[in-house]
Image: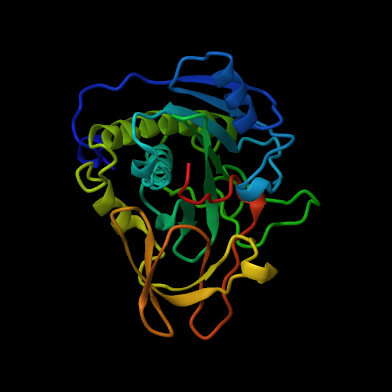
Amino acid sequence: MDRSEAVPDRGPIPAPVIHRLARVPSTQDEAARRLAAGQETPFAVATGEQTAGRGRLGRSFASPDGGNVYLTYVHRTRLAPQRRSWIPLVAGLAALEAVTSAVGDRGPVLGLKWPNDLHLEDGRKLGGILVEGRGSDAVLIGIGLNVRGPVRGADGAPVPGAAWLLGDEGIRATGEQREGAGDPEAMRARIERALAGALAAELAALESTEGDADAARSADRYTMTCLTLGQAVRVDPLGSAGTGGARSSSLRGIARAVDAHGRLVVDLDEGGRRAVDVGDVRHVRPGGPARPATGAARGAEQEVHGT
């Protein structure tokens, strides 16, 4: 994707500093520590291995050494809290752009499972994003991408439903010559640079329009890349109990649109329409059960909208 077509032209955007570390417990925690110590924003923390990586709702996930991307980008926003709902979605656009720029746009189609997981059209997951807030205005965007495969969980078993770029059955486009093609460490470094630049551009565009994704040209591009739209989906609550301790019920229907607030609009099976801003969204195979999220071992899990 051409950057000049991706976001409004606002002139050159300085490349954020990337602090590369061999091993950390968590890039989110390391980034938060540096932020609290006064590190100037924006900046990124990247590592080759996490020993205590976490995903949505504090769930742990395996982050083994081996050339994969584990990166947290720290952004200080001027947007009011109610205007930040598109930040997780444009983070997904940035990740998609970074992967495409690093590996080429031939081969299997990549897209976004709402709100920001990177998936192939066949449902396999390449990576995901965790968005967390710190204080009144700082946003931490954690991104995990599978560079080398096959992907294995903490127990060493292959992870079902995972996708990766390099190695046997990797999806890197053949015939594309890119720096570091075939070398996981070089590919990781290339993607890290592309991620930092793409996030800076996407977030600058969103900030310049006071969070208006239409004016930032983000909404149309997101719609074109969102694999969830048109799918039968099941939306599960995030594990919280309702009144009297009862669990909230799941929603089922067809995903139709993404609204101005970044919410997923679902035409419900029982009638009516619902705009979803939190929950686990699962694509449902025609005539089959809901396809579960592909697990934490592929990188950062998807995060809900709130920052």
In the shown orientation, is residue 295 left or right of residue 153?
A: left
In the shown orientation, is residue 146 left or right of residue 64?
A: left
Where residue 293 appears, x then y in whole percent? 59, 62
Near-viewer residue (167 or 45): 45
Where residue 43 appears, x then y in whole percent? 47, 22
**Above-or-below relation of 265 to 163:** below
Near-viewer residue (113 or 148): 113
Where residue 61 appears, x then y in whole percent? 69, 46
**Quadrant of the rendered image containing residue 294:** bottom right
Where residue 17 appears, x then y in whole percent? 46, 18
Residue drawn 58% across and 30% down?
Answer: 185
Could you tell me which quadrant the N terminus lies in?
top left
Near-viewer residue (61 or 298): 61
Residue 260 visible? The answer is yes
Residue drawn 23% across and 37% down?
Answer: 209
Q: How is the image coloured?
A: rainbow
Q: Looking at the image, how many numbered discs can be counted on the residues?
A: 0
Residue drawn 60% across and 38% down?
Answer: 68
